[in-house]
Amino acid sequence: METPYVPKTVEQKWQQQWLQSQAFKVAESTDKPKYYLLEMFPYPSGRIHMGHVRNYAIGDVVARFKRMQGFNVLHPMGWDAFGMPAENAAIEHGTHPAKWTYENIASMREQLKRIGLSYDWEREFATCDESYYRWEQLIFLKMFERGLAYKKGSSVNWCPDCQTVLANEQVEDSCCWRCHNVVEQKELEQWFFKITDYADELLDWTDKLTGWPERVLAMQRNWIGKSYGCEIEFPIVGSAEKIKVFTTRPDTLFGATFMSLAPEHPMVKTLVTAEQQKAVSQFVAQVERQDKIERASGENEKLGVFTGSYSINPLTGEQIPVFLANFVLMGYGTGAVMAVPAHDQRDFEFARKYELPIRVVIQPEGEMLVVEQMAEAYVGAGQLVNSGQFDGVDNESAKEQIAAYLDGRNEGRKTVNFRLRDWGVSRQRYWGTPIPIIYCDSCGAVPVPEQDLPVVLPKDVELTGEGGSPLARHQAFLKVDCPACGKPARRESDTFDTFVESSWYFARYACPEFTGGPLDKAAANYWLPVDQYIGGIEHAVMHLLYARFFTKVLRDLGMLDVDEPFTKLLTQGMVCMESQRCAEHGWLYPEQVADGNCTICGKPAEVGRNEKMSKSKKNVIDPNQLIEQFGADTARLFSLFAAPPEKDLEWNEQGVEGCSRFLGRVWRSVTDNLELIATAELPTAAEGAAADLRRKTHQTIKKVTEDIDGRFHFNTAIAAVMELVNAIYAFKDGQQQPGVVREALETVVRLLNPFVPHASEELWEMLGHAESVETAGWPQWDADALITAEITLVVQVNGKVRGKVEVAVDAAEDVIKAAA
RNA sequence: GCGAGAGUGGCGGAAUUGGUAGACGCGCUGGUCUUAGGAACCAGUAUCCUAUGAUGUGGGGGUUCGAGUCCCCCCUCUCGCACCA
């Protein structure tokens, strides 16, 4: 009689069913509001890990919930398929990156399908598909036309042994990760995207992205790093040239007693005098070494060297020495700073070390700074002193006044400086999108004509890991005639940074099959922006900033009409697990530990709590095994129940069992009551204990709806359903009012559908419904059912609980007072 | 240093607006049923106390009839940026 719950059978059945009915296929529609839900697409590494399960389970709850609420939900999936791991695998295993990548995609797709995620699989694509990257090449050409893509010299990490460029992540302690030789800096011509043109817009919009976590916005603001200040020109003694500095403190200009330049500053050569030549080159070499090793170790002693030259402080007319200093960065501002030791801590330390003059030009109120007694720079507010006609002015107004004064004499001007720099997109790598440019001796860098796209990445290459990118040696690929003059020319052999692909994939999902351009504008405008984006916090800056930038570029290219790609963002936490380590035998698998001791040597194992799952720590749970043992529904339920989505989730075997038990309990609550409720009608009212159950049912609908919608409190939503299930178990008057039981059970099944869709569908069918539970829609709560006849009032005297009284809900105040 | 966030039972975590702190789950304790169960079901489980009761949300102040929640100061932890001129 009783049907046991066998997750595997149930899950296979419904996954098959969804596939056949194309349940999650969507098209543009006007009779339903659209909702675009997206999780960050995965890199096809070969296997799904628990982080993916969590990410996609979270997304699937929202997708299914919104669908049940009547939204036209776009929920696509694809693959961020270009990148280095494929090349490395090719080198190690003698396979081809394409083969490796597509095989990984095939097996990961099957894994994802076993989780029961509601994707419109017809929209799936991989960024290494020619039909995707060809449109990326077109976007590049349009950007090139507009001056948004340009080429300039830039230094890169170069391994002289492997003859290849290394990404920053491939440099470990200044050495090549593969051959462990010291990495050099090499000057190369690279392609850049002019993200700095959008710095202001990217920054301004951070205030309008109210659906984003504050910390992500803070990181982006920090990264963009806008600061208001002044550009000031310092003439060089005995030269017509001037040194430009950027400062946020023009008010302290009278206190600038020397100047510091970055060791890499282009004017260093002309500034160094013959006598200082040797000292300077020694210093530059020293900083180059220090940059990598000492800087990383937190060493920050201020070091410098005198160039032998002097510049002139434009306000005091004084000659001030020009130094090189290790703390001045070429990449920020102009690479030159006016040093005001009295009011800047770094300049202060530098001046003390090299015995340079310190002059106080800002006096704080109610205090008298004396240079000899200063232990550190004074960086606060105050009134100007030793500043000529500006004496007595408060320093905030002095910023304006001095900037205006300099502007009038054409010696400086107010300016804005950004930390953000243009995005270098060239990679000397094989497995990426070829940059569609042809170099001609006569015509220079010529864009590949649109009709010649795509520039197909050739497949016939062999990867050895040495000698640089195989594209740079692939004659058939390289040799091409100049599209402008027809003379023999050479193709660009660099490929794009893979962040380029992930900067617009979300838009392509709107029209993955479109052959008329990157985007079908109508489809893109219908679906975009993404209403809810979900992914890891590790992408807080790079990916999310680049995607925002690209969206604005696509808008300005006329390809779509939105300003921002992602209306709401949810950054989910990591999946962690306890790890165990033996002093002698290193990290231990859980089965290598018995009673807290290492099973190899018997010594106590050290327990590390909350460590991110990683193979090296042997604390990884394989989703396949988990699903095999408990089923996809349990895996989903636990990853949603154990922690709120934005927090780290600590994996716990017993917690998983708890979720599995709960599903069994739900299952039995339905199967045990099937006979009872077989002919029962849904109630519109109830009496006594049945009214309490009915109230609980409708309270639960309300709670779960509000918890999911916008708040993403899945853990408390699930807890609420558990309470309802407990109430059904506790309810003993089923014989009298079976309809109330049916209502409660159907509610449980419907509310659980976004979390455990397979079990939910199966139970819904058992309850006698021919149509999918998703078609049945999201339940509505009945406000009348929420009303109680009596409520418990807590009587507090001086804030202490002194008693409880039961009163009618509509009792008058004096009745309540009397009762109390 | 700057920026963001967090400190609540043995554990994961609840507590939309200030109103019975500890929902729900794990673990633990006891029970029922069973040949047996790590199955299922029922009950209990913040701390102290025999109990009335008292104490409890990192610490210290404050506002309030009433504070986990609001204000001030301090401590600790996590994450991000970090010589940013």
Image: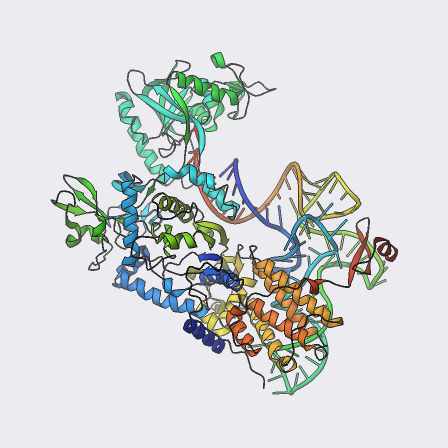
- Counting the numbered discs, the total is 0
Task: Give the x, y percent position of residue B32.
Answer: 71, 81
- Residue A352 falls in image quadrant: top left
Residue at the top extreme, as displayed: A389
Quadrant where the N terminus of chain A lies?
A: bottom right
Q: Decide: is A196 above or below A127.
A: above
Identified at 70% across, 74% down, the residue is: A731
Outermost residue, front side? A31
* Location of residue A40 (image quadrant): bottom left
Which of these two is toward me, A76 or B19? A76
- Picture residue at 48% right of the left edge, 76% below the top: A8
User: Image check: A326 left or right of A160?
Assistant: right
Q: Is residue A298 visible?
A: no
Q: Quadrant of the C terminus of chain A?
A: bottom right
A629 vs A235: above or below:
below
Horizontal side of A633 relative to A154 (left or right) equals right
**Residue that extends furthest to the left in the rendered view of this protein:** A487
Q: Please report the residue visible at 52 percent of the width from the left and 23 percent of the height from the top.
A: A396
Residue A27 appears anywhere in the view: yes
Q: Position of residue A36 (x, y in %)?
A: 46, 56
